Image (spheres, rainbow, N blue to C red):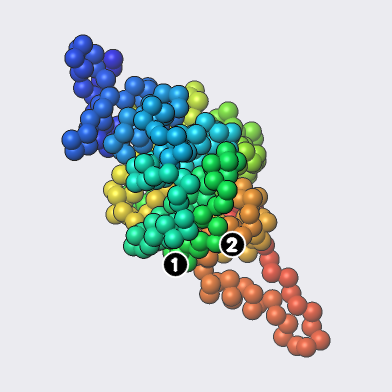
Amino acid sequence: MARRSRSALPKHVSPARDRYGNVRLRFRKGLFSTYLKSPFPSDAFDDEYQAALRSEKAGHGEIGKARTKAGSMAALVVSYYGSPEFLSNATSTRTTYRRICERIRNEHGDKMVRDLRRQHVKAMLGKMSATPAAANNYLKILRVLMRHALDAETIARDPTQGVRGYGQKSGGFHTWSEAEIAAYEARHPIGTKPRLAMALMLYTGQRLGDAVKLGWKDVSKSRISVRQEKTGTPLAIKMHASLIEALQMAPPDKATFLLTSFGKPFTAAGFGNWFRDRCNEAGLPHCASHGLRKAAARRLAEAGNSINHIAAVTGHLSLKEVERYTRAADQEKMADAAVDTMPIRSDQKPRQSQQSGIVGQTDN
């Protein structure tokens, strides 16, 4: 097995020799240790890694079947993993759902589903008051599990019905400002892989899981095509001049633009860890890859594009979600543009606000 660079592997993972002398990838966190069987990088490796982070070994087939009691929360989770509702989700969604399901199983797996009441659900959420966003996600997955239990006739009533989550006080991932974009660009100039990574997300407005799959195969003349993993939405996006400039350093004969130090395509988890380090190098520990998707939406909004135009780039199916993404748009700039459309005299028709192209032509 070829030697691997420790820096390219996820946190807590390193090469190690097993008792047979074979070099394998080993996860070690505190007292918990396990070998990861799937090749790195791969989606299967990501699943095992996430399971290892939860101090559990990823099983095969129906995970945990032998350890569950019929009618228990643990049995419900295992049953849900084998359902069409779970398996039809995108890989990234399954990973997210599995992480929360495993938390529910660890905390309440021995309890019987039929005994779960509304007051119990509220008590669970009450213990998570310090992390309201996590509590809301916890409630969301509980609702999913209860719908599965209703379908399986394990329960007659949904105990999560009518339970309200926490009000959203946060906009989620931080939206990169122009100053932060400039700081990153100063640290990672044109011609570097970190700069290419930023350009792919900022000038296409895509999620990191889709950005890491892009390659020359997706480029046709002045457009780059994306089929979003999460929604299946196909997009054809005009390439911004800054993206074209950054792509000059991309390898011409590889499947994807972004490659690991081993010359392999990134997985979403691997890229997230790698990009986290690049942000830290630029003095931006509060910035993350998803914030660039929001920054793209912000730029498009500030350039005067409609919500429909912005969605044509980002691929959002919900216009309400686009509105949430563009809350960081420069209010003063947009207010000035709106006021300029007002007539000077009462008999003068309102002027139309000028719109830039779909891919934002804003100041960098």
Give the CA separation, mark 1 to mark 2. 16 Å
Residue at the far top in the pictured view: 20
Residue 140 in the image: state x and y as whole percent.
Answer: 50, 52
Helix, strand or loop under label 2: helix
Residue 202 seen in the figure: no
Q: Residue at x 62, y 38 (%)?
A: 232
Circle 2: is it few (<14), some (14-19), or many (20+) Cα within 10 Å?
some
Residue at the far bottom in the pictured view: 346
Quadrant of the rendered structure where residue 270 is? Answer: top left
Q: Residue 169: which numbered mark, if any?
A: 1
Q: Tell whether label 2 touches label 1 (CB within 8 Å).
A: no
User: Which circle's residue, 1 or 2, is located before the other in the chain?
Assistant: 1
Q: Residue at x 54, y 46 (%)?
A: 155
Residue 338 seen in the figure: yes
Q: In this view, does 261 lie to the left or right of 86?
A: left
Foreground residue, 2 or 50?
A: 50
Helix, strand or loop under label 1: loop
Residue 125 in the image: state x and y as whole percent.
Answer: 40, 59
Q: Nearer the viewer, mark 1 or mark 2?
A: 1
- Residue under label 2, please give it: 323
Circle 1: is it few (<14), some (14-19), or many (20+) Cα within 10 Å?
few
| Residue type (three-letter) at the residue carrying disc 2 | Glu
| Residue type (three-letter) at the residue carrying disc 1 | Lys
Q: Residue at x 51, y 54 (%)?
A: 159
Residue 1 in the image: state x and y as whole percent.
Answer: 28, 15
Q: Is residue 3 left or right of residue 68?
A: left
Q: Is residue 249 above or below residue 132?
A: above
Quadrant of the rendered structure where residue 43 is? Answer: top left
Residue at the far right in the pictured view: 347
Residue 338 in the image: state x and y as whole percent.
Answer: 64, 75
